[in-house]
Image (spheres, rainbow, N blue to C red):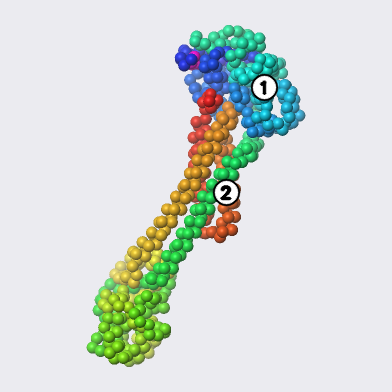
């Protein structure tokens, strides 16, 4: 006996008080009533696919409403067969595919001979390869009944199975249901407003303004119940994925293309970023030497005090030499030159120092001595001299050696060692050779450091500031802020484009996922009515997306290899795009599955 109590129904939008009904086992029970009287709503409750849980449902003396959602899904899967008013068939399948689909859904193997017997049982004569959409209404109804019988249900529910049929086909269906009671161990419940009900029904309930009224009753014939073991669904899940991929070919191809284009576009932008950064670094290398000078804190800006200042810690120099990104560390020489009555400082010109764009005049290609333009150029013209010879180390050791002038520094060009425009630059190798002949060693209180790039220079400066005290850092050899801002602005501009592209295509992909799910909403609802569980939905829906992502990934790898846009960030970029798309897909599928409502879908 099936018992439903405390059932609230509506009749022509008017709420009716709570009702009860008892359905005898192994009989054909009809629910009669006009359109809108609540017949389908009552069947949804009997089929456990109603969102309304405020009623009592007893079957085999068990309170069904106290069961968990998984236990109720198990009942829908193995115990309850449901035939919807519009048949609930997948129109783009063949008859064989449809039967195989429901076989796997019920955890059974597909046997062609057994299927022929089943089709004969429901009086359906058609070819296995015939498409469902080519069947007549009566044939579709018979096929829907056959699909429901595949699970060998104890309760078979049919919602208006003859509403679209003529009287001859209507009688055939009713007689078929009557005959099934002789061969099947099941209880059949049918909603219908047909006047032929009286001829075939064992029990009749009518839904009217008074509620659920018993018009014809019969004695209960308790059936033998077999405990069904829950079968693994992997065969169905894989078959569903195969069918879904085949039946939604165009949509799947579009989604693969969209994801591939988004990924490829992002990789192209990343390649542009890498190239732009290389161009920026190259430009920086042309205009900047990535140079700094470190001194003891007690070194004065006046000449001749480097010897007397505190030496820099040897540990510091060793650590700097091992620091990542440091190109070269040079000892410093304190040198000046006598020019008439004036003593002019001479600073080292290292191999890493660039002179492009810094010279007023080039005299020779070999790098030796470069006086500043200020006053010294006038001195050279007046005396017609292109060399200097009176040099002084540490303000006390004089060296008389002619050093030729290789060029004149540009007008107004100063150096980072000091702000004065009176200075000279001497090639460091010449300076070393001169110091060696004079027996002079580099000072211990100052060193000059060159790095590979601006980032390494900044990291080294931060390291020295944090680790050591009483160290003066001169980083005015280049405009660090300008260089960093130039690089950061380039990165920021391209990175924004990259993330906009990634997010845009991911959103398009997710929207297409949503559109695909909406197109399959009826199909998913049928699955829910047949006991597919939440975790199984999430698996099949997202494995579907994973397959598309995999195909897209392969396409991207091939295309990126063809057009040569591989980069170190490629895996990270693709992981972000596919990860974001998959996460959104999972969240979307969770929301969609949670909101699946057979009542809403099949009423529409």
What percent of the width, then of the height, locates residue 555? 59, 51
Q: Going from the N terminus, do you reach mark 2 or mark 1 first?
A: 1
- In the image, taking residue 544 as reference, residue 353 lies left or right, namely left
- In the image, taking residue 201 as reference, residue 597 lies left or right, namely left
Label 2 Cα neighbours within 10 Å, binned few <14 / some 14-19 / many ≥20: many
205 up-or-down from 233: above or below? above
Q: Which mark is residue 138?
A: 1
- Secondary structure predominantly adopted by residues drawn in magenta: strand
x 52%, y 37%: residue: 515
For the residue pair 166 and 68, the one nearer the viewer reads as 166
What percent of the width, then of the height, locates residue 576? 49, 50
Asked if the residue under mark 1 is in contact with the one under mark 2, i.e. CB atoms within 8 Å, the reply is no
The Cα–Cα distance between marks 2 and 1, rounded to whole angstroms, is: 43 Å
x 37%, y 65%: residue: 483
For the residue pair 451 and 321, the one nearer the viewer reads as 451
**According to the image, label 2 marks what residue?**
552
What percent of the width, then of the height, locates residue 77? 61, 27
């Amino acid at each position: 006996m099936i018992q439903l109590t405390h059932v609230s129904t509506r009749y022509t939008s008017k709420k009716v008080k709570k009702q009860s009904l008892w359905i005898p086992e192994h009989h054909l029970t009809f629910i009669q009533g006009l359109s809108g009287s609540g017949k389908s709503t009552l069947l949804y409750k009997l089929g456990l696919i109603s969102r309304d849980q405020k009623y009592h449902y007893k079957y085999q003396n068990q309170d069904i409403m106290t069961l968990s959602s998984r236990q109720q899904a198990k009942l829908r899967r193995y115990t309850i067969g449901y035939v919807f008013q519009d048949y609930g068939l997948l129109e783009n399948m063949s008859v064989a595919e449809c039967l195989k689909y429901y076989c796997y859904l019920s955890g059974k193997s597909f046997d062609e001979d057994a299927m022929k017997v089943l089709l004969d049982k429901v009086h359906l004569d058609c070819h296995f390869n015939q498409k469902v959409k080519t069947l007549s209404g009566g044939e579709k109804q018979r096929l829907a009944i056959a699909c429901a019988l595949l699970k060998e249900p104890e309760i078979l529910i049919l919602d208006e199975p003859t509403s679209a049929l003529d009287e001859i086909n209507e009688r055939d269906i009713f007689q078929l249901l009557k005959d099934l009671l002789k061969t099947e161990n099941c209880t059949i419940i049918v909603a219908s407003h047909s006047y032929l009900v009286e001829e075939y029904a064992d029990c009749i309930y009518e839904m009217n303004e008074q509620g659920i009224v018993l018009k014809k009753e019969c004695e209960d014939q308790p059936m033998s119940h077999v405990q069904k073991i829950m079968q693994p669904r992997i065969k169905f899940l894989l078959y569903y994925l195969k069918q879904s991929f085949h039946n939604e070919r165009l949509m799947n191809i579009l989604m693969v293309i969209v994801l591939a284009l988004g990924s490829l576009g992002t990789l192209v932008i990343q390649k542009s970023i890498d190239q732009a950064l290389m161009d920026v670094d190259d430009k920086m290398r042309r205009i900047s030497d990535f140079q700094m000078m470190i001194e003891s804190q007690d070194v004065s800006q006046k000449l001749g005090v480097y010897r007397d200042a505190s030496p820099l810690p040897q540990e510091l120099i060793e650590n700097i030499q091992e620091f990542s990104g440091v190109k070269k560390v040079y000892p410093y020489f304190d040198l000046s030159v006598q020019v008439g009555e004036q003593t002019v400082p001479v600073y080292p010109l290292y191999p890493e120092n660039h002179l492009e764009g810094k010279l007023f005049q080039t005299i020779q290609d070999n790098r030796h001595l470069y006086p500043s333009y200020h006053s010294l150029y006038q001195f050279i013209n007046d005396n017609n001299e292109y060399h200097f010879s009176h040099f002084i180390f540490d303000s006390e050791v004089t060296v008389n050696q002619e050093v030729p002038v290789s060029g004149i520094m540009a007008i107004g060009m100063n150096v980072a060692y000091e702000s004065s425009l009176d200075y000279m630059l001497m090639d460091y190798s010449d300076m070393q050779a001169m110091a060696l002949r004079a027996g002079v060693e580099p000072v211990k209180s100052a060193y000059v450091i060159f790095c590979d790039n601006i980032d390494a220079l900044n990291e080294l400066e931060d390291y020295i500031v944090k680790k050591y005290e009483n160290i003066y850092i001169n980083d005015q050899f280049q405009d660090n802020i300008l260089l960093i801002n130039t690089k950061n602005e380039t990165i920021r501009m391209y990175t924004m484009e990259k993330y906009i592209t990634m997010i845009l295509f991911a959103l398009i992909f997710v929207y297409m996922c949503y559109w695909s799910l909406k197109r399959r909403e009826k199909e998913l609802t049928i699955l829910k009515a047949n006991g597919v569980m939440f975790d199984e939905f999430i698996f099949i829906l997202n494995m579907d997306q994973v397959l598309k992502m995999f195909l897209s990934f392969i396409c991207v790898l091939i295309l990126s290899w063809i057009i040569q846009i591989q980069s170190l960030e490629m895996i990270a970029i693709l992981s972000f795009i596919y990860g974001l798309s998959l996460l959104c897909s999972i969240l979307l599928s969770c929301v969609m599955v949670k909101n699946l409502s057979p009542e809403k879908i099949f009423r529409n």
